[in-house]
Image: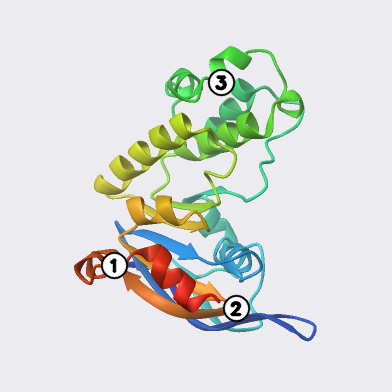
Amino acid sequence: MSVIKCENLSKRYGEVEALTDVELEVKEGEFFGLLGPNGAGKTTLLKILTCQLKSSEGKAEVFGLETYNHFKDIKSRVAIVPEQESPPSFLTPREVLELVVNIRKIDDNQIDYWLNFFELDLMEGRVCRNLSRGQKQKVMLASAFISNAKLMFLDEPFINLDPLVQSKVRQWLKKYVDEGGTVFINTHLLENAERLCHKAAIIHQGRIQSLINLKDLKKQNLTLEKLFHEIVK
């Protein structure tokens, strides 16, 4: 079953073509990576898929629903970690998670688990505006992981995390996908993509340049980094 599908998807900002004729499909239970240099169009595509932007042409669907016209139905079923860590400034990490479980109408018995998982229990009483960038990123990840969503959109989720936390997050995401969840991740950290993804697309200058099955890549004794550098010159 396809949970994400793009057909002839394009996005223009005036005369600037941010995305051109994107064709993409992500199936349920896949760990899918969108890889590309800065400015390649990764975040623009993610914003279209998460109902934040309207495409100029073509179609984008999540759970079979056209994204911009069904944003309420889609947003209630997905979790999003944006590129810029931005938890509510005047709430503590605990209060942010309490807000999430109240909005999503889910049990609050996982709040302490996720505070402990990300060592945010040590920040008890400290509001998010006074946290470091890495700590804010942990709050955003905890907010997504606690949500029980079956589809996660992660935009550069590892960028502000130390190596130990990155390892814990990778392990949790692998388990999440093994149990039937689906992940769409934007990243330019190729090592993490190679460790995690079943499939990936390399995007450059707004166009999908290559669709990759990571198992096939390994059979060819070709690394993701080498392929990436061949395409993005």
Residue type beneath disc 3? Leu
Residue 214 position within the rendered picture, expressed as x and y whole percent measured from the top left:
29, 64
The answer for how far apart the CA atoms under marks 3 and 1 are is: 36 Å
Mark toward the start of the polypeptide (3 vs 1) = 1
Mark toward the start of the polypeptide (3 vs 2) = 3
- Can residue 65 be spotted in the picture? no
Q: Residues within 10 Å of mark 3 (few under 14, many from 20)?
A: many
Residue ID at (63%, 51%): 83
Q: Does residue 29 appear left or right of residue 134 in this picture?
A: left
Mark toward the start of the polypeptide (1 vs 2) = 1
* In the rendered image, the vertical position of residue 130 relative to residue 176, given as above or below: above
**Marker count (numbered):** 3
The answer for how far apart the CA atoms under marks 3 and 2 are is: 37 Å
User: In which quarter of the view is residue 217 placed?
Assistant: bottom left
Q: Nearer the viewer, residue 201 or 92?
A: 201
Residue 103 position within the rendered picture, expressed as x and y whole percent measured from the top left:
57, 37
Residue ID at (65%, 62%): 52
The answer for how far apart the CA atoms under marks 1 and 2 are is: 26 Å
What secondary structure is marked by label 3? helix
Instruction: Determine which of the numbered discs, if any, sits on residue 1 in the image.
Output: 1
Q: Does residue 97 appear left or right of residue 167 in this picture?
A: right
- Can residue 199 be spotted in the picture? yes
